[in-house]
């Protein structure tokens, strides 16, 4: 039957650890007990043990990465409201939400020393409810900004101004760390999308 094609499990992202001793991967399939076709993603870990270890399941799961020390597996999935960065601790086998921002996190990257994470998000400024702000359709867009999250302090700050947009179209994710974790390079443009 044609619908049986959707019952097959598919392998998504496959990411080896930095030391090459473990592999984390996603498997996705259509939920079977719904009338609408909705994808279900599962995250698994394969190491020296004979069995594959199940880590998490979500309706969306992407951008799997290892921390530089191979202690944590990080990925993007839904938090309370927005797409957030979650981590799975390979030593105690527990997952936790690391960062939930005021909007969806689009991409992220660990610093080489593992102390910080940079991420991109498009955050709309809050307008005052009592002030009338005329809408200019020429400026009806929200720039994608680069932020840094300090893991020990559990705080973040914007690295790019809201007047430019980190460009991710040609060089994903649009930014990268220097090997010594002291500098970040990024591509940008005046606004998101094609610029003419």
Image: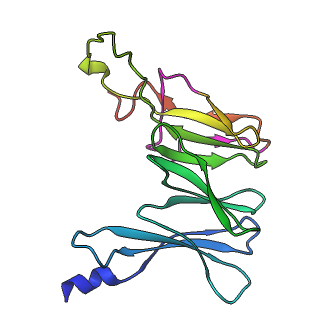
Asked if residue 155 lies left or right of residue 133, the reply is: right
Taking the image as drawn, is residue 30 in sight? yes
Of the 4 image quadrants, the one containing the C terminus is: top left
What is the residue that sits farthest to the top in this orientation?
A: 131
Q: Is residue 29 magenta?
A: no
Q: Position of residue 57 (x, y in %)?
A: 49, 69
**Callout count:** 0
Apparent side of residue 178 relative to residue 15 in the rendered image (left or right): right
**View extreme (front): residue:** 130
Q: Which of the two residues, 184 or 108, is positioned nearer the viewer here? A: 108
Q: Magenta residues, as a range?
A: 160-179
Residue closer to the observer: 79 or 39: 79
Say which residue appears at 70% left-offset and 61% top-offset: 72
Judged by its main secondary structure, the magenta piece is loop
76 relative to 114 in the view: left or right = left
Q: Residue at x 35, y 29 (%)?
A: 195
Determine whether 170 is above or below 144 in the image: below
Q: Is residue 54 above or below residue 172?
A: below
Q: Is residue 164 magenta?
A: yes
Q: Residue at x 26, y 70 (%)?
A: 37
Identify the image's colour scheme: rainbow, by chain, secondary structure or one colour.
rainbow
Answer left or right for 121 relative to 24. Answer: left
Instruction: Point out residue 155 in the picture as x, y percentages from the top left corner.
Output: 67, 35
Instruction: Quarter of the image for the N terminus: give it.
Output: bottom left
Q: Quadrant of residue 184?
A: top right
Judge whether residue 186 can be spotted in this image: no
When the figure is inspected, residue 17 is found, relative to residue 190, above or below; the finding is below
Please name whichever residue, 60 or 80, is drawn nearer the observer in this view of the structure: 80
Q: Residue at x 71, y 45 (%)?
A: 111
Q: Position of residue 59 (x, y in %)?
A: 41, 64
């Amino acid at each position: 039957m044609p619908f049986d094609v959707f019952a097959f499990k598919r392998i998504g992202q496959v990411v080896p650890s930095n030391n090459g001793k473990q592999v984390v991967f996603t498997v996705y399939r259509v939920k079977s007990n719904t009338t609408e076709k909705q994808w279900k993603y599962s995250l698994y870990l394969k190491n020296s043990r004979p069995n594959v270890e199940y880590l998490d399941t979500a309706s969306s799961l992407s951008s799997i990465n290892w921390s530089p020390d191979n202690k944590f597996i990080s990925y993007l999935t839904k938090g309370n409201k927005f797409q957030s960065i979650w981590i799975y601790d390979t030593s105690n086998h527990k997952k936790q939400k690391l960062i939930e921002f005021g909007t969806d996190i689009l991409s992220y990257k660990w610093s080489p020393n593992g102390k910080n994470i940079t991420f991109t998000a498009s955050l709309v400024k809050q307008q005052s409810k009592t002030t009338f702000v005329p809408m200019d359709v020429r400026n009806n867009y929200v720039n994608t900004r680069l932020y840094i999250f300090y893991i020990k302090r559990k705080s973040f700050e914007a690295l790019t101004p809201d007047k430019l947009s980190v460009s991710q179209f040609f060089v994903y994710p649009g930014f990268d760390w220097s090997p010594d974790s002291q500098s970040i390079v990024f591509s940008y443009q005046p606004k998101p999308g094609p610029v003419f």
